[in-house]
Amino acid sequence: MQTHEIRKRFLDHFERAGHTVVPSASLILDDPTLLFVNAGMVPFKPYFLGEATAPYPRATSIQKCVRTGDIDEVGKTSRHNTFFQMAGNFSFGDYFKEGAIEHAWNLVTGSEADGGYGLDPNRIWVTVYHDDDEAAGLWKRIAGLPEERVQRRGMQDNFWSMGVPGPCGPSSEIYYDRGPAHGPDGGPVVDEDRFVEIWNLVFMQDIRGEGPGKEGYPILGTLPAKNIDTGLGVERLAALLQGVDNVYETDLVRPVIERAEALTGRRYGTNPVDDVRFRVIADHARSGVMLIADGVTPGNEARGYVLRRLLRRIVRSARLLGVTDPVLGDFSAVVRDAMAPAYPELATDYARIEAVMRAEENTFLTTLASGSKIFDLAAGETKAAGGTTFSGDKAFQLHDTYGFPIDLTMEMAAEAGLTVDEDGFRKLMAEQRARAKADAAARKTGHGDRSVYRELLDRGATEFTGYEELESEATVL
Ligand code: ATP
Ligand code: MG
Ligand code: MG
Ligand code: MG
């Protein structure tokens, strides 16, 4: 089943059940807690918080999402995109747990002829919050799931909250068992590569307060109106329904891999290191196009920096696959062709998107050319002196003068058989930030929250998940 059909079936199912179909919001919303929209519920936040009254009791959408916190997973797990589409159904004080579970079960396991996705019910496992007996009971009654396939989890995994004080409640997640070839038995609690999470149902029922209490916080009371917020990963379902191994091989992402094969002359599926690069290219090309379409331009702060990092990683990955010519124009065109049927603005605004891509690639290629010389020189000296560590000083200079992200320096160092003195690099970065802060304070302007983003990014690849702190599940789904 193609992605467009998956999208259509979702919206049709919920529209038939009285939900208003709401178009995807932009990836960029005016929300200080978020860099990018990262869940389907984000545009509906005011309704859930009670700041505004929902104009409909039920809604459904397929929301564009970007999760920068997942960037390090891309290409390595089978299920993490930086850009993906989250299909959701929402109830604002209307139906609750029973309705949400019934809908999800019917759609996921309903036959294709009846408009469902036709997944084998015997392969479905679910998780519930550990004391949510009500949800566990509903799964057994509605879906007939045996005890073993209703697993219980704690706060970390199956409890959701938004703000303090704010709405909160248990969640329940639906997993599909890909079979023993993909990992050990035991359900999602044991292995999430074999048991792939496809759908998260959030039951907003209580108000969370501050201070000690149940598992570290008190429940102040129940919400006057209970809400439902769900999110189904369209790409994950597509991978399952198309019988491919991972989200990068689905109908709308795979064409970029094929284009990369043509450009590089290498074959996807030949060696695992190259494969990760192919998948990174395919994933990031799509995110890049979608972000530019929504108005982001590459830069050195916040959103622009994320976009810049995604685009530069594509160029880098293509080089590692042996191509030094510009590639972003090619990949963008493939993304446009795949995605424009659902997002027509990609076609109508393509000239601008492509121009942004090309300009960034040219800037980066110039940067790479001059920075690589400095890098090679310093790496050569280090090795000649019998050293194995690329100095923090040089890494800092590359960053500061040539705009080399630390992950790029680390990658190049690794290829040269060196490690980078990361501590030294970070110390210099911290000193620079302290100076910038002092300057800003002196000028009484400052860049406030933006420097926070920058700081997180500068902590480098391994800690890039710092974004999760901003886009945390504590803030949104
Ligand atoms: P995981 O544990 O696999 O990282 P999650 O619990 O972070 O997923 P949720 O926040 O519950 O995901 O989001 C709802 C749904 O969106 C998930 O069940 C999944 O199908 C999909 N989803 C989440 N993150 C991604 C991603 N990075 N790429 C593709 N789909 C995703
Ligand atoms: Mg996740
Ligand atoms: Mg999860
Ligand atoms: Mg989840």
Image (tube, rainbow, N blue to C red):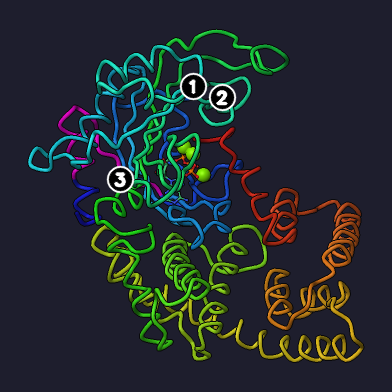
Label 2 CA crowd tier, 10 Å (few <14, some 14–19, many 20+): some
**What amino acid type is highlighted by mark number 3?**
Pro
**Residue that mark 3 sits on:** 23
Task: Check disc 3: other Cα within 10 Å, few if <14, some if 14-19, many if 20+.
Answer: few
Image quadrant in which you'd find residue 115: top left
Q: Are marks 2 and 3 in contact (CB under 8 Å)?
A: no
**2 vs 3, front mark:** 2
The mark closer to the camera, 3 or 1, is 1
Q: Are marks 1 and 2 in contact (CB under 8 Å)?
A: yes
Q: Which residue is mark 2?
A: 154
| Alpha carbon separation for disc pair 2 and 3 | 34 Å
Label 1 – label 2 distance at C-alpha: 6 Å
Q: Return the disc, 3 or 1, that comes first in the chain's sequence.
A: 3
* Residue underneath mark 1: 129
Question: Which of pointers 1 and 2 lies earlier in the amino acid sequence?
Answer: 1
Numbered disc 1: secondary structure: strand
Classify 10 Å Cα crowding around label 1: few (below 14), some (14-19), many (20 and above): many
